[in-house]
Structures are given as C-alpha cells and as structure tokens.
Image (spheres, helix red, strand yellow):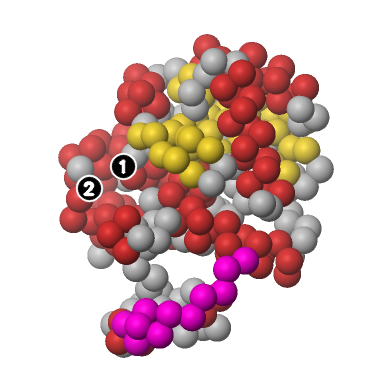
Amino acid sequence: MSNLADQIREALSMFARNDTEPALIGGLAVVAHQVVRATKDVDFLVEAEAAQKVHDALLGLGYQCLYRSEDAANYVRAAQGLDLLYAHRPLARRLLAQASERETPMGRMRIISVEGLIGFKLQGFVNDATRTRDLDDIRALLKIHRTSLDMDELREYFALFNQPELLNELLG
Amino acid sequence: MNFSDNTDTHVETAQNRADASAVLAREAGVPFDPPVGKAFGIDPIVEWLSLMEVVQMLCPVWPVRDRPMQGNHWRL
C-alpha cells in the first residue's frame, strides 16, 4: 500500500481513538464521487468540538500545525499534508451528520455528499480565486452527477456565496 | 499493481472513445471517459490508488502546502 494510503489509514485510526467521526472532503472526496484524478489532498470535515483533541493527536503523530482558526487548520509532516475544516455552523453540521459511510482499501470512512462537496469547493474558490482546480472539480462533479443532484441544495450554496450565476455557467 | 488484459473491455472502451471528452494521462492522451461506479464494478478509490502509485513513482516529492488557507468567507 502506498505512503498516501498509509497516511490516510493512520489518520482514520487516530480519529477512531478520539471518538470522532469525520467526513472526507476535498480532492479525495472528489475521487470518491467518481472523478478520478491525481491528488494528495487529505482533507476532513470534523466536528468543531473535537478540534483540540484532534490537534493534540496530530501533533503526537509528528504533524506540525501551519495554521489554525475556528474554521480550519492545516498540518504538515515532511511531504505529507492534512487539512481540517471544522463543522460549527448549522450547514456544515448537517453535512457532517449526513455523510455516507463507505468501505475503502484504507478502512471504513464517511464521505460527504456530492452537493456538500460542491459547496465546500465553492467556498474554497470564493476564499482564494487562484484555486481554479476547485472550479474544474465542480464542473466535473456536475457533469457526472447532473441527473441525480439536489439542485435546490446546490442553489442554496451558490446563493450563500453570492454566486447564483456561476452555477448556471458551470452547468453550461 | 494489477495489469490485466480483458479483450472484451478493450473493445467496449474503443467504442466509447468516439464520444468521450475526458483525457486521462495514463491512457497516453487518448480520450477515454472511464466508466467508474458500482454499476461497472470499478471503485474510484481503488482506481485513484493505482493512479497515485504511478504518480508517486514519477513525482516522488509532491509539493506540500507552504501557506495557510486563504480567505474570510467561511459560511458553511
């Protein structure tokens, strides 16, 4: 198994030891939703209440904290990165609660819905417009899942970030 | 890594290529939209692991984040 898979497996064990059930978000969640592309982004959505114990556990595993706020944290360990978003607003809490469980080669993990993933990708792009990869991911997810997406939920996310026209643009 | 040669799959794949728009690097630039998903018996995470094995061989040192997340628009 690759170093990357080992890193994810180790993170999942750490979460389990700390009685927290995160949801996979970011590039790897894009993969889990059938857009297979190269990525080493290991991103999890974690309940905000678990932030401190997860922080301590990651430091214990040798990670260094690059940044931490009430919304997000970035950790690195040599060539490995791990990012956390904290669910403390109602929408993120709902998305975390609704994440679906899946058996993977790295172990059982919860994965955020396609709609929620698009919402977080949009948030990433609005926060940093140089992250055009986020728009490419949204476009690819819309293309693959178009017939099954909850469009009302998606419109809610695009309205939240004052980008209602962007959704139509991405849908083509 | 698993190198399989399923002729039926290849024939079907070739038929799909005419309509495909996605380009997968490991397919040497040949347009190919992989039929991923439960219905096709292909797990995207297994596919990703296989892809990343090759990526890590070609690019053993992948740039890690060197600056924190940007922005003030945290609304989710």
Judged from the image, the secondary structure of the residue bearing numbered disc 2 is: loop
Identity, as a three-letter code, of the amino acid under mark 2: Leu
As drawn, is A43 to the left or to the right of A33? right
* Identity of the residue drawn at 57% across and 42% down: A106
As drawn, is A164 to the left or to the right of B74? left
Please identify the quarter of the rendering in which residue A7 is found.
Answer: top right
Span shown in magenta: B1-13
As drawn, is B2 to the left or to the right of A126? right
* Identity of the residue drawn at 46% across and 76% down: B23
Instruction: Give residue A149's mark.
Output: 2
- Quadrant location of the C terminus of chain A in the rendered image: bottom left
Identity, as a three-letter code, of the amino acid under mark 1: Glu
Q: Position of residue A142 (x, y in %)?
A: 30, 56
Label 2 close to label 1 by CB (< 8 Å): yes
* Identity of the residue drawn at 77% across and 47% down: A79
- Label 1: how many Cα within 10 Å (few below 14, some 14–19, many 20+): many
Judged from the image, the secondary structure of the residue bearing numbered disc 1 is: helix
Q: Exactly how many numbered labels are in the figure?
A: 2
Q: Position of residue B15 (x, y in %)?
A: 30, 87
Q: Is residue B53 magenta?
A: no
* Identity of the residue drawn at 39% across and 34% down: A101
**Viewer-nearest residue: A147 or B52:** B52
Q: What is the CA distance from the residue labelled 2 to the residue labelled 1?
A: 7 Å
Task: Decide: is A107 above or below A131.
Answer: above
Instruction: Give residue A102's mark.
Output: none
- Label 2: how many Cα within 10 Å (few below 14, some 14–19, many 20+): some
Residue A99 in view here: yes
List the residue tagged with mark 1. Answer: A115
